[in-house]
Image (cartoon, helix red, strand yellow):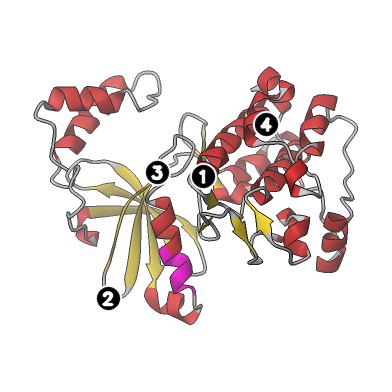
Amino acid sequence: MSKMKNPDELAEKHLKTVRVPPGLEKPTEELVRRMISHTAFNNPDYKWCLNDFELGKRMGRGKFGRVFMAREKRTGFIVALKTLVKKEIVKGRVERLIMREIEIQSHLKHPNILELLAWFHDSHRIYLILEFAGKGELYNHLKSSPNGRFSEHLSAKYVYQVADALEYCHKNEVIHRDIKPENLLLTITGDIKLADFGWSVHSPSLKRTTMCGTLDYLPPEMVEGRDYRHLVDNWCLGVLCFEFLHGYPPFEGKDQEDTYRRIRTRDIHYADFISAGARDLIDNLIIIRGEKRLSLRAVMAHSWVQGNK
């Protein structure tokens, strides 16, 4: 794709898509102009390498690698650089999983989905250049909140943004399959970024059979090994809302089998302080029969969400 001839017009166009914290308008404009002037801008054939970045602090560590804050040298643009060790990927037999994550996330463009900006590799590692979410994992914010839970106001805001991101995924025939606080990040402006598409799948039929995801969040159709559709994400959104408001997921058991039993029987108990509106939303998402679950559009329009977000 060729560059637009007028850089001022291009800068103005991109600035309209950015939510800028108050007081940072001028530095943001300067950064956007530097980005536009970069050789890689609108050039999918640009060959990135590790030398393009200055590595900062380590932000996280996973089974197959680490995530660092990094600065692109020419523009000063801050990103998250996810490094994956090839021999660990091969040892774990997750080559297809990693490539699927890259393929899916590189095509998703939504305000509440963490953007995969580019990727490259060398003889030892794969590097994912990811959008930087300045406030980190939502899980850490949940655990450090008063009583280890979010207010209804904050919960409604986050549920709305996750629902919006998931609806976009489903429209693009992508099922995430691993919604949980650890896979949600917060930007510096306090907005949600849905991340970690390692378990996601592009499924034109929106129908699958693979067992995956996190134990406490598994819907009954996965627990029972049945075919499932994109509505597994709707169940997970209900579980997520419950955890936001209580500080723990609804089906925690003393062991795996007890958790599975509670999921299959929908053994759910609310704390007394949970409002009727919040219960109504959760009850209409955590439904055994997937086709009966509330649609994501209906979640965003729900009176509790609209009244609190």
Question: Please, what is the three-letter code of the amino acid marked with disc 2?
Answer: Ser
Labels 3 & 1 near each other (Cβ < 8 A): no
Residues 40 and 247: in front is: 40
Labels 2 & 1 near each other (Cβ < 8 A): no
Q: Which residue is mark 2?
A: 123
Q: Which residue is mark 4?
A: 299
Q: In whole angstroms, how far apart are the C-alphas of marks 3 and 4?
A: 28 Å
Residues 214 and 97: in front is: 97
Question: Please, what is the three-letter code of the amino acid marked with disc 1?
Answer: Cys
For image coordinates 39% across by 19% down, the residue present is 22
The x, y position of residue 161, in whole percent, is 57, 33
For image coordinates 29% across by 25% down, the residue present is 15
SS for tag 1? helix
Q: Dot 1 surroundings within 10 Å: few (below 14), some, or many (20 or more)?
A: many
Query: What label does residue 169 carry, if any?
Result: 1
Residues 48 and 237: in front is: 237
Q: Is residue 67 visible?
A: no
The x, y position of residue 144, in whole percent, is 66, 40
SS for tag 3? loop
The x, y position of residue 129, in whole percent, is 33, 53
Q: Which residue is mark 3?
A: 132
For image coordinates 44% across by 66% down, the residue present is 98
Q: Dot 2 surroundings within 10 Å: few (below 14), some, or many (20 or more)?
A: few
Q: Nearer the viewer, mark 2 or mark 4?
A: 4
